[in-house]
Amino acid sequence: MKKRVLLPLFFLHIIVISHLYAQNPVDNLINDPLLKNANISLMVKNLKTGKEIHSYRANNATVPASTMKVVTTATALEILGPDYRYETLLAYDGKIDAAGVLNGNLYIIGSGDPTLGSSKMGDPYFLSRWATAIKAAGITKINGSIIPDESKFDNEGANPKWTWDDIGNYYAPGIYALAYLDNTLRVTFKSGAIGTKPEIINLNPSLEGLTIENNLLSSSISFDSAYFYGSPKSMQRSVRGEIPANKPVFAVLAELPDPGLALAQALHKILSDQKIEVSSPPVTFSSRGFTFPSNTAIRVPLYTHYSVPLSQIIKEINEKSNNLYAEQVFKSLSLTRDAVATNKRSIEIIRNFWKARGLDVNQLFQLDGSGLSPANSVSAGFLTDIMEYMYKKSKHKDTFFNSLAIAGKAGSIVGFLKNTPLNGKVFAKSGTISRVRSYTGYIIQDGREWVFCVMVNNSNGNSRQTLNRIENFLVDITKDKK
């Protein structure tokens, strides 16, 4: 008969405590050496029961990065609906005479459509359709100009809460009532030996008056490390940083300084190609030395261009984390209340909407629509509440759910949780800026329906290491099959 080994009570206590600690995913996360000094906010809830499963500082506001986009898209879906389409109106003032000469100006009147000329979606031949509509109106010549009218948005352009090193780059473009070509300028360089200055060989689109102070260097790097700088609408830009040496062609993307003007120039060209003369070059309302008709001048509608449905735009925002699309949608929410859209009014609309639905908006400090500003702050509890609302109460649940990226499969989280049991089981929005990693979404696995939000600010590790800790946390919480 074997003897039973009796451990002292003290050692049994230590074993039990150690076992419990090892099994607690939240403790494992917050006590990780790389995260113990970080600002962390998290919440996990059971969507079927509404029960809170895990929580840590869930009501503490934390920088969300692009997870802020779910606030923008959820609100837009609820207020505007998935079938909403942006309208861009062609109109003219003056008169069309018997010979088909328009003695007046042609206006392009925007309302925030982010898809005009976009590489992501929309009609690639829309300018030809506009030219056809102008011909159909009997216009053979325009004795005037093509004027982009952006008066439905304020003239702020870039959000003032964005950082200077972001403004001027393609991912932080100015936001106007007229967007064109994703508000992106393609700058092509030819680089030489290491230490030399690359040469700018092409700009697309080409904007008259645009100058770029070139402070780039050719270096031994293999990637794009060029950054553009410039204030909204300014035609004076600078570029700094490095690009690979000895490249005969190397393209870098920047902000398009005046998308409305670029759109008017593109329409001017296509009309010219189709033998419809426009006597004066395109101008914007900020152009010097140009006298515009009075505000009381009668404009005659000529053609209305409709965007793709909002459901498609929101999928691009949530799945691909498109900043431009998010900001255009965010700002255009103001037009449901005001004649001119402003960030301030959109923030107010969003806060009032969710407050009326019982959410604690004291945990929301929103300054833009995309999450690019490091001054944004929101709690994991608030984001979880929005995600829960969209899943359980919204009539647009399917549209919202299907707009999210899929872990290991699609969108901005295609590499997230890829080689784990949660591959293809997490539907979420990610967020990453300097010293920020965040995720919010749904876990649909083995009959479980959970909503979660995990935000980590200022970890002592790099971004990849922080992501790895979040992945481990989500895998750990789903190990229990109960």
Image: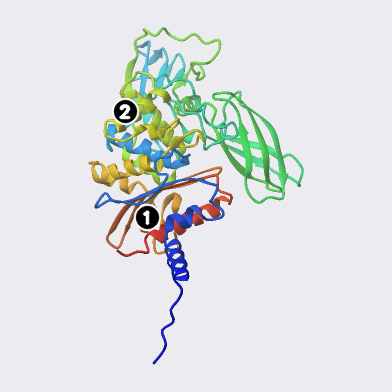
Which image quarter is the N terminus in?
bottom left
Residue 88 visible from this viewpoint: no
Q: Is residue 323 above or below residue 344?
A: below
- Per the rendering, the mark at residue 426 is 1
- Per the rendering, the mark at residue 161 is none
- For image coordinates 31% across by 33% down, the residue present is 354
Residue 122, x across and y down, in percent: 38, 38
Residue 471, x across and y down, in percent: 46, 57
Count the labels in the image: 2
* Mark 1 crowdedness (10 Å alpha carbons): few <14, some 14-19, many ≥20: many
Residue 244, x across and y down, in percent: 68, 48
Give SS at disc 2: helix
Residue 351, x across and y down, in percent: 35, 29
Which image quarter is the C terminus in?
bottom left
Q: Is residue 445 above or below residue 456?
A: below
Residue 286 visible from this viewpoint: yes
Rendered image quadrant of residue 434: top right
Q: Nearer the viewer, residue 295 or 49?
A: 49
Q: Nearer the viewer, residue 478 or 444?
A: 478
Residue identifier under label 2: 352
